Image: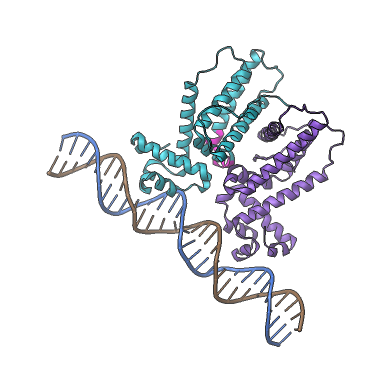
Chain colours: A cyan, B purple, C brown, D blue
Amino acid sequence: MPKQTFLNLPEEKRMLITRAAIDEFAEYGFEAASINRIVAESGISKGSFYQYFEDKMDVFRHLLDTLAEEKTQFFKDCHPPGKDLNIFGYFRWMIKTGLKFNSANPKLVKAIARVMLSEGYYYGQMFADVRKRTMDALIDLIRTAKQNGEIDASVDEKTAAHVMDAWGNVISNSILDEGMQKRTWSGGCDLPKHKSILMTCCP
Amino acid sequence: MPKQTFLNLPEEKRMLITRAAIDEFAEYGFEAASINRIVAESGISKGSFYQYFEDKMDVFRHLLDTLAEEKTQFFKDCHPPGKDLNIFGYFRWMIKTGLKFNSANPKLVKAIARVMLSEGYYYGQMFADVRKRTMDALIDLIRTAKQNGEIDASVDEKTAAHVMDAWGNVISNSILDEGMQKRTWSGGCDLPKHKSILMTCCP
DNA sequence: CCATAATATGACCAGTTGGTCACATGACCA
DNA sequence: TGGTCATGTGACCAACTGGTCATATTATGG
């Protein structure tokens, strides 16, 4: 966790630092990210940095918290789906909302995704926790769907959760990367046509 | 390309260096990979290294070549599918064979995947080329399938290629996550014993 | 106004990086 | 044998790394 000193900072300064960190991790990943660049970019001194955070890992943890916080808020602000949606409709809503969020916060998402996807395995418990939480939520969803008769009882819950998880990631990443390359981010949720047909099932 | 000096090297020494490079990139990604560690690991001097390769990028290019070469050979050695397979059967065969290859060469695949997936965009043409080749191969496949009447003429080729590409990744990832449980994929494809990020690449 | 506590600073550290270069070694040929 | 040329070597370079710490600045409240 960031130290108290950081939390005492005025919002504006905190945002400045956070944004600099996001840029750095998004561009260089964890190993190659440079604290010197972060402090230079955000205009604070190195000493201050280490008064705000324990170490490099600590800044990244702060980004994880930021993501969780902002994403949760985003999902709350979005009108939640009607109660009558079945699991497939609900999953579709989740992906769509997730994509909207990614479109609105490409750098933050990329920073996290980069580190988690390619270096995450080396950083132990923290990443495992995030993954487990996601997986548990999906399994829960599937279990409910089974009880409602929307999914056949014979379906293996874990496998289905993996498919849903991976599917969501692939779509998100492919869109995110495309957007990063083209640098054309309209805040809207309009997706390229070929990306929105993806809820098909294939042997 | 590696310099001629490298190609003149005895096979054994070349392999030693290549393997050291694979380990390094797999573990640290491109930015954080250390040439010092590579030369230490492979027991050559720094000066020699720079007589073999232009620079860091050059070693990585060599790994890309190695992957392409080995994967092509692997697919050739595998019994190719019967001529009577339709596009779906063929696609399934491709994925299955790709997974086998990944299981057999986890480090190499991981080294490439890591750099390409998370840092590739910064290295310009090279990355774009690989992706384009994959996509073109898929589009070609689909076009042929259309001519054979296996796919409706109205299907957009690019869209379908994206779906196939994404599906390949989904399956790879989901299998990988289950890797610990030694589940067997239909067709007797042994599961990888450790986690790594896979890239489904069509030769 | 001063004392104390909180915060800010950048010089400094040992260690690393990718890359160079003058030189040593050794293989081949005359 | 001596000469030539490809190959091997590691000390060396400037630039950077994550992290520390003594000191300077500011805020607080009595």
**Magenta region's main secondary structure?**
helix
Residue drawn 64% across and 55% down? B59
Residue drawn 47% across and 48% down? A34
Q: Position of residue B111 (x, y in %)?
A: 64, 47
Number of numbered labels in the structure image: 0
Residue drawn 49% across and 46% down? A33
- Image quarter hosting the N terminus of chain A: top left
- Image quarter hosting the C terminus of chain A: top right
Is D11 placed above or below A42 here? below
Range covered by the magenta-colored residues: A118-128
Q: Position of residue B40 (x, y in %)?
A: 60, 60
Quarter of the view holding residue D8: bottom right
Is A44 placed above or below D22 here? above
Is D29 placed above or below C1 here? above
Looking at the image, residue B82 sits to the left or right of residue B201; the answer is right
Looking at the image, residue B9 sits to the left or right of residue A32; the answer is right
Q: Position of residue A134 (x, y in %)?
A: 57, 28
Q: Position of residue A166 (x, y in %)?
A: 63, 31
Q: Is residue A40 magenta?
A: no
In front of the other: A120 or B115:
B115
